[in-house]
Image: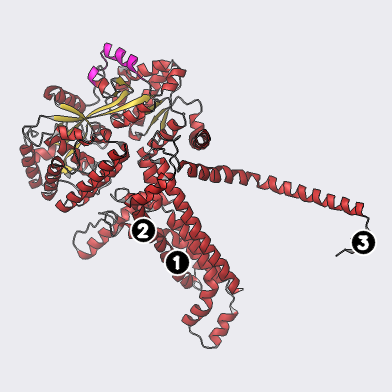
């Protein structure tokens, strides 16, 4: 439909005006690109290029010094399914991911609900957040001595029972992964709690007040009002913890350094072990590719779920 | 294929340059993963620098797997450091096959002529008869023993036979000591007792382990595991889960420690006096009719062929590394002995070990760690560590089966 301006102005003037608009738009776009160019270059060179090289390496026969220039086809990927280690690492990773989602969330949500309306809550929040600022390798080194045969836990048990106790928490097949998960929860519960507190703060008070007036219990209020409105935040936290669970390496490598089965403690550890310890660069790259695809797929599914939940709330 | 190779080489070059680019520019460095020996290696680098007129600096990369990863990517991207520490045995074979290591025959011939080293020592760093490294460390694997513990247990002299050793273990236990310090830490130590017991029962089988001639679940290995398990049952070993590998020996809980004699330097830094607080003896063979053997550990410094070809002055640095000055510098700083016949052994322990070996003339064998293919080294050690944590007969069977599977799969893939 013609505008008043277009009816009043000649075609030449309109053409000039549009050309000027395009030039302004181009200059704005160019300026924007100049500002974001450093970030694009950084992401391209330090993130995308290594990912591309990694994918290429996974199709070579590079083992230690040789094989870099030999094409291996899909043999490295086929090998994943031919050896038991990959399935063991996958199982342990799944265990980790579930533990990394459920436990920090449960503990952090409990803490968030408790800390919402108490005195000195900022102090408590800071204290719970403190482990997150520590380097994971430092955390692992310290917690090793918590779990060591003559470490803190066993010393407490020995003190309480009056008998020597030197159970190898991070040497036993059944307890090594749960032990490291506890350390992971200790380190991540703070950040999870802060995010949940932000989500709780964003929940409007009116529906809660109205429910209270109608005689709803705290449990009913949480179940029918708080939890549905908190769900988008919970899903954000889940996405972050899923990625962390899939890629956990440092805690496992440091704490379980002398555990004989450490190779398959997680896919990330398996990838490192095959690459750096065994010199199997091509095979390690294939593991990295598969791990990356898994993380992207699961994160994308959760992100889609999160957007659906947010839309339904609105 | 050329696009493939170009892309991967370009990516690798970018990655390598990014991670160590600054360090690698005009890099005549001496790379090492042996951080406890930094002072000695810095001194050696300084002597080599003065002799050649080049600046050779020490660069540390630890731990060992990260160091090996760095070297593998450096060699793959044709960016080999001028000097770097490595391992002998199979590891050296693999490195020499890449063409990255310089043939140092000229320097060795001169060093032998000058009386600094022997032809036998040259063999420690040779592949197909040609030497590809200079010696950084030559160590005999011996049993360190606590002199006070032996005295308290009423042991007048170190054991000469296996039966005497077992009897001494009982005496030490009665005196309140754990006979042997035997950690499983560091990702490598579990192989120590495994290889010693195979060696002590059948040295030829020991050699055959790493060349696929002796199966890891064969009768020879079964015998070693049976003895090993028996020793655990009798309480002859310390808790393998202790991360500090010297703790129980240094704090006088354990009376003996089977390890390379380079460890004497570490005990000295922990306040123990070599030759006073601790001495050494050669581990006797388990089976009486098996001749005495000793494991010899030799660590070379490898020289880059490309660096030497491009800069002939580096040859003076190579010659300097083979001089008594470097040997004495290593000895006086970190008590490491590189075997130089004109160098002074750094302490009474190493001097005594050399005399012991010269007198006993045992069969010298390359350490299992260097002889085994590195692709299965970690997996096999993990299995041995698994046995140390649970030294039961059932677990021994499981471990031997797994080890042989790992070994067989590797050789089948060759």
Identify the residue position indicated by label 1 in the image. A105
When the figure is inspected, residue B179 is found, relative to residue B22, above or below; the finding is below
Element type at mark 1: helix
Q: Residues within 10 Å of mark 2 (few under 14, many from 20)?
A: some
Chain for disc number 3: A
Identify the residue position indicated by label 2 in the image. A91
Rendering coords of residue A51 (x, y %): 51, 45
Does residue B277 show up? Answer: no
| Residue that extends furthest to the bottom in the rendered view of this protein | A214
Identify the residue position indicated by label 3 in the image. A7
Does residue B32 show up? Answer: yes
Q: Is residue B107 a member of the stretch shown in magenta?
A: yes
Q: Residues within 10 Å of mark 3 (few under 14, many from 20)?
A: few
Rendering coords of residue A211 (x, y %): 55, 84
Give the side of residue A252 with respect to residue A244, left or right.
left
* Marks 3 and 1 share the same chain: yes
Give the side of residue B367 with respect to residue B41, left or right.
left
Report the predominant secondary structure element of the magenta stretch. helix
Q: Nearer the viewer, mark 2 or mark 1?
A: 2
Q: How is the image coloured?
A: secondary structure
Instruction: Give the residues drawn in magenta, as a range.
Output: B103-120
Give the side of residue A67 with respect to residue B400, left or right.
right
Q: Is residue A191 a member of the stretch shown in magenta?
A: no
Report the front residue among A186 and B124.
B124
Picture quadrant where residue A208 is located: bottom right
């Amino acid at each position: 439909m013609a505008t008043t301006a277009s009816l009043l102005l000649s075609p030449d003037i309109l053409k000039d005006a549009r050309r000027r608009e395009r030039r302004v738009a181009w200059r704005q776009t160019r300026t924007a690109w100049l500002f974001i160019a450093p970030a694009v270059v950084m992401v391209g060179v330090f993130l995308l290029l290594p990912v591309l090289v990694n994918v290429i390496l996974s199709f070579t026969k590079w083992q230690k010094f040789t094989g870099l220039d030999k094409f291996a086809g899909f043999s490295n990927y086929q090998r994943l399914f031919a050896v038991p280690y990959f399935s063991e690492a996958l199982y342990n990773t799944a265990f980790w991911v579930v533990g990394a989602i459920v436990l920090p969330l449960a503990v952090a949500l409990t803490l968030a609900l408790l800390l919402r309306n108490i005195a000195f809550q900022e102090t408590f929040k800071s204290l719970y957040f403190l482990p997150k600022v520590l380097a994971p390798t430092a955390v692992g080194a310290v917690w090793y001595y918590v779990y060591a045969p003559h470490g803190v836990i066993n010393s407490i048990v020995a003190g309480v029972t009056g008998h020597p106790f030197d159970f190898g928490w991070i040497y036993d097949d059944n307890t090594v992964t749960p032990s490291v998960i506890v350390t992971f929860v200790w380190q991540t519960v703070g950040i999870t709690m802060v995010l949940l507190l932000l989500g709780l703060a964003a929940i409007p008070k009116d529906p809660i007040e109205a429910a209270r007036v109608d005689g709803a219990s705290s449990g009913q209020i949480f179940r029918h009002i708080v939890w549905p409105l908190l769900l988008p935040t919970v899903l954000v936290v889940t996405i972050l913890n899923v990625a962390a669970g899939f890629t956990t390496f440092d805690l496992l490598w440091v704490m379980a350094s002398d555990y004989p089965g450490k190779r398959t403690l997680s896919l990330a550890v398996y990838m490192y072990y095959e690459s750096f310890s065994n010199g199997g660069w091509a095979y390690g790259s294939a593991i990295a590719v598969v791990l990356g695809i898994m993380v992207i797929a699961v994160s994308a599914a959760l992100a889609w779920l999160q957007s659906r939940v947010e839309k339904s709330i609105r | 294929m050329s696009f493939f190779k170009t892309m991967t080489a370009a990516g690798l070059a970018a990655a390598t340059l990014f991670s160590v680019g600054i360090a690698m520019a005009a890099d005549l460095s001496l790379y090492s993963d042996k951080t406890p020996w930094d002072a000695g290696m810095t001194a050696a680098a300084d002597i080599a620098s003065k002799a050649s007129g080049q600046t050779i600096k020490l660069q540390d990369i630890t731990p060992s797997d990260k160091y090996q990863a760095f070297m593998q990517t450096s060699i793959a991207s044709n960016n080999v450091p001028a000097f770097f520490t490595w391992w002998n045995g199979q590891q050296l074979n693999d490195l020499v096959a890449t063409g990255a290591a310089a043939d140092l025959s000229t320097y060795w011939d001169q060093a032998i002529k000058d009386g600094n080293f022997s032809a036998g020592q040259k063999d420690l760093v040779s592949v197909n008869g040609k030497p590809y490294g200079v010696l950084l460390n030559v160590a005999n694997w011996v049993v360190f023993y606590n002199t006070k513990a032996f005295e308290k247990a009423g042991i007048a002299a170190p054991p000469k036979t296996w039966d005497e050793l077992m009897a001494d273990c009982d005496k030490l236990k009665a005196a309140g000591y754990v006979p042997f310090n035997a950690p499983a830490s560091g990702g490598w130590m579990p192989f120590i007792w495994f290889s010693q017991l195979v060696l002590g029962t059948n040295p030829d089988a020991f050699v055959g382990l790493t060349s696929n001639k002796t199966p890891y679940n064969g009768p020879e290995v079964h015998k070693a595991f049976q003895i090993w398990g028996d020793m655990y049952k009798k309480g002859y070993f310390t808790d393998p889960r202790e991360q500090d590998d010297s703790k129980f020996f240094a704090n006088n809980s354990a009376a003996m420690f089977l390890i390379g004699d380079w460890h004497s330097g570490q005990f000295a830094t922990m306040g123990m006096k070599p030759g006073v607080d601790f001495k050494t003896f050669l581990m006797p063979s388990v089976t009486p009719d098996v001749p005495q053997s000793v494991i010899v550990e030799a660590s070379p410094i490898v020289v880059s062929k490309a660096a030497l070809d491009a800069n002939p002055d580096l040859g003076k640095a190579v010659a300097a590394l083979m001089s008594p000055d470097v040997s004495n510098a290593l000895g006086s700083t970190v008590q490491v002995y590189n075997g130089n016949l004109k160098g002074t052994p750094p302490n009474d322990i190493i001097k005594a070990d050399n005399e012991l070996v010269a007198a006993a003339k045992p069969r010298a064998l390359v350490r299992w760690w260097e002889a085994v293919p590195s692709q299965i080294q970690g997996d096999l050690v993990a299995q041995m560590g698994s046995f140390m944590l649970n030294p039961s007969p059932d677990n021994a069977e499981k471990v031997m089966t797994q080890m042989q599977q790992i070994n067989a799969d590797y050789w089948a893939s060759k």
